Image (cartoon, helix red, strand yellow):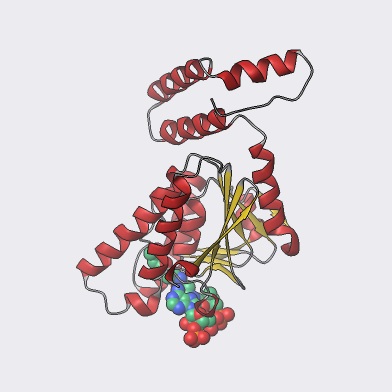
């Protein structure tokens, strides 16, 4: 039952995770965060998986952390709750396959932070983003002062976090929070299609490129460039790289085996 708070469907090599607490606009309570963590940990061991799409049931992606649960928190309980959220989002971010957030409604507070824990965000015209915690006398607790800054830069992140303002999909795209906007009815399928497209690429190369970009972003440029050189070299020791280049030269489609 608890697991159903985060529904898992398989679309070929793509896993579709749906945040599923629509009566509370998919607000993240402790049970939902644990369910998300369980789902993500299970996906981490799935060798056939090539991409993950995260979306929300009903009119919200996720309207934030659960205010009703947080209301009575002591500082100590708030710390544990923030750690739980970070643990779940870190696990999602660390998946070796690309993760795409498909946001077709409210992505506020913890919802915007969940979207930022994905590799990129697709939105529909109905998407609304924001970090409204200051309206509640609190601050973001699941990455709004960290991942959001890295994603859109410090000035826009400060404007969103310090004003609590809500922005629409077009504004979110303009500031680099959203990659693409699709018609609402097509959103999830377009995100799944992007995942299926990735499934045709060399899986070791995709995982390696993701890891190097992730780690390089938090390193200084010389260290990041060295990480890239090493990973580039390692890719030449894979059969997939030999197959990909042979297929190109023989004018045929490659058959990647993840080796
Ligand atoms: N926590 C708990 N319940 C929530 C919720 C949340 N974050 N957001 C919505 N809900 C519940 C509402 O209480 C309501 O429940 P009832 O039907 O039982 O009354 C139901 O979802 C529907 O919501 P509304 O009636 O409010 O719907 P609306 O269309 O009028 O407004 C909204 C939609 C603008 C998203 C509004 O619900 C809202 O402002 N929600 C809170 C957004 C927010 O502040 N998020 C940040 C939370 S703090 C956080 O996330 C901290 C962190 O970083 C870890």
Tell me residue 121's x, y (percent): 59, 51
In this view of the protein, which residue sits in the foreground, 177 or 240?
240
Residue at left offset 67%, top offset 67%: 126
Q: From this viewpoint, is residue 154 visible? A: no
Residue 73 vertical placement versus 110 (above, below): below
Residue at left offset 39%, top offset 35%: 218
Tell me residue 242's x, y (percent): 61, 15
Query: In what quadrant of the picture does the N terminus appear?
Result: bottom left
Left or right: 74 as drawn, with respect to 8: left
Residue at left offset 53%, top offset 29%: 204
In this view of the protein, which residue sits in the foreground, 55 or 182?
55
Where residue 128 sits, quadrant-wise, is bottom right
Residue 61 vertical placement versus 251 (above, below): below
Q: From this viewpoint, is residue 74 visible? A: yes
Where residue 162 sits, quadrant-wise, is bottom left
Left or right: 196 as drawn, with respect to 62: right
Tell me residue 37's x, y (percent): 40, 57
């Amino acid at each position: 039952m608890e697991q159903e708070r985060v529904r898992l469907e398989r679309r070929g090599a793509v896993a579709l995770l749906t945040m599923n607490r629509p009566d509370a606009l998919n607000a993240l309570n402790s049970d939902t965060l644990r369910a998300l963590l369980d789902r993500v940990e299970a996906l981490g061991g799935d060798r056939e998986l090539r991409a993950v799409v995260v979306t929300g049931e009903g009119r919200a992606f996720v309207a934030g952390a659960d205010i009703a649960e947080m209301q009575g928190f002591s500082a100590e309980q708030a710390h544990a709750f923030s750690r739980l959220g970070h643990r779940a989002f870190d696990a999602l971010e660390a998946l070796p396959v690309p993760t795409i957030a498909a946001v077709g409604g409210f992505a506020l507070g913890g919802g915007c932070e969940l979207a930022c824990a994905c590799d990129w965000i697709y939105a529909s015209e109905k998407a609304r983003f924001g970090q409204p915690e200051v309206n509640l006398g609190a601050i973001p607790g699941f990455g709004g002062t960290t991942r959001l800054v890295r994603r859109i830069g410090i000035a826009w992140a400060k404007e969103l976090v310090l004003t609590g303002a809500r922005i629409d999909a077009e504004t979110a795209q303009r500031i680099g929070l959203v990659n693409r906007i699709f018609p609402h009815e097509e959103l999830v399928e377009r995100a799944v299609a992007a995942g299926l497209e990735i499934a045709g690429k060399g899986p070791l190369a995709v995982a390696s490129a993701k890891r190097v970009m992730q780690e390089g972003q938090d390193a200084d440029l010389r260290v990041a460039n060295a990480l890239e050189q090493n990973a580039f070299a390692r890719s030449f020791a894979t059969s997939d790289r030999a197959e990909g280049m042979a297929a190109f030269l023989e004018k045929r489609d490659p058959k990647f085996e993840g080796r």
